[in-house]
Amino acid sequence: MAASPQKVSESTVRRLSLYLRFLEEFEEKGVTTVSSEELAGRGGTTAAQVRKDLSIFGSFGKRGLGYAVPLLGREIRRILGLSRSWRVALVGAGRIGAALFEYPNFRTRGFRIVTVLDHDPKKVGRLWDGTRIRHVDTLEETLRETKVDIAILAVPEEVVQDVVDRVVSVEIKAILNFAPTQLRVPNDVVVNDVNMAMELEALSFALVNRALR
Amino acid sequence: MAASPQKVSESTVRRLSLYLRFLEEFEEKGVTTVSSEELAGRGGTTAAQVRKDLSIFGSFGKRGLGYAVPLLGREIRRILGLSRSWRVALVGAGRIGAALFEYPNFRTRGFRIVTVLDHDPKKVGRLWDGTRIRHVDTLEETLRETKVDIAILAVPEEVVQDVVDRVVSVEIKAILNFAPTQLRVPNDVVVNDVNMAMELEALSFALVNRALR
DNA sequence: ATAGAATTGTGAACGTTTTCACAAACTCCC
DNA sequence: GGGAGTTTGTGAAAACGTTCACAATTCTAT
């Protein structure tokens, strides 16, 4: 009924993110109250699922009425750890790194890229929107100095394991990995992978097996 | 024991992609045979899981020995539909689009970007490595002419639903979406989402709830 | 005040995915 | 050729996630 004693599944966390996004849309439209039904209708899930997901963390609704949009938004933000802001390092200032740096949704959700590192001497020293690119050789000092919480790795797969080992050595516990490689990390470190080739392969499989629908 | 009669879970498909990648590494190293144990050790799964995944599609191993690397690679490629090559359209030639276009792992897996579309008159007409950028207004004709199988959407969230509707109207059945929006599509169309903000939020949650480990 | 309508929160049922455990099948070596 | 040692393929068990169904609670209208 209060904090978060249970084990929370990955899918629940992903759905909370979704709900938060929908709530923000509702809030913009000036809607003050939503039902689990309405929240579910916006994305691929069910009203019961919405209620189950939320019930893990507490009871935020009013029976007969629904959920107060701003309150539920605040609660989900708190649950996801988004009430604070996170200091993020971007390792790799190539094409993917550049795209991520500009990605507006990071900032609005409290993820601040405070550090950019690259290997290329031509890029080191450049200023990206107020952030000076530093050489990846200085990774350990830089991440410590800039008090980074989360590292985003947008480096080639050949070097990503080396980079990870160094990132882990300065006690960073959360990593978002764009290289198509399974990283080896101690098990108190969380890694999330964004593997675009894998996504395309899943589409390929779906196309080939479309028969069974 | 032969083709693919069963329902195949999404996680199984993702793991097949992983196995394929590992097999390719083994092949490069000249390893000719692997056990389910070795295949599992390379990524976050178990030997039993590997065997279960494969057994859905057939029996490719030899008891007492393991799996022949090149053969299993071929089989997984066939299962995933990677024996053929797929024609891909990239809608949106902004930062993310550019990064994707250059991403080397697409080509090596048989995904050929044959079409690039953008909205910006300054970009339309430019040649990207042999591919002329066309205006998004010509989406329907262009996708038909170039016989596209899969569309990658790297457009702003405000317009992505419009673009999807048009893509769907020319009978495209597979979409990879980079906009942080839940798309509405007919249910014979498969959509995979790459939502980077959501990944960061999952990391945030993990950090905040690290206590329970 | 009370009846009626709406909607939550949650135990229990159900379905799916993962893990276990072991017989069957193969290899290798003496 | 036979025995020891591996490793697969797969039913059965366990764990996990989703859906169902309904009592409890709140709101609204009269």
Image: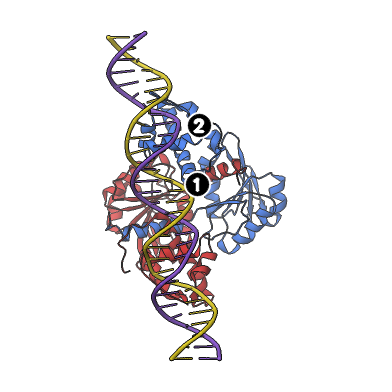
Chain colours: A red, B blue, C yellow, D purple
**In the depicted view, which residue is nearer to us: A91 or A157?**
A157
Please state, as top left, top right, bottom left or bottom right, where the N terminus of chain A lies in the image: bottom left
Residue depicted at 50% across the width and 31% down the height: B58
Whole-percent x and y of residue B2?
A: 54, 31
Disc 2, SS: loop
Disc 1, SS: helix
In the visual, does A163 lie left or right of B54?
left
Q: Is residue B120 visible?
A: no
Q: Amino acid at mark 2?
A: Gly
Whole-percent x and y of residue B20?
A: 47, 35
Looking at the rendered structure, which numbered label has been put on residue A98? Answer: none
In the visual, does B142 lie left or right of A200?
right
Whole-percent x and y of residue A109?
A: 42, 65
Residue marked by disc 1: A196
Residue marked by disc 2: B58
Marks 2 and 1, how far apart in space? Answer: 27 Å
Residue C13: image quadrant is bottom left
Whole-percent x and y of residue B90?
A: 60, 49
Q: Is residue B82 visible?
A: yes
**In the depicted view, which residue is nearer to us: A31 or A51?**
A51
Looking at the rendered structure, whether the residues under marks 2 and 1 are on a common chain is answered as: no
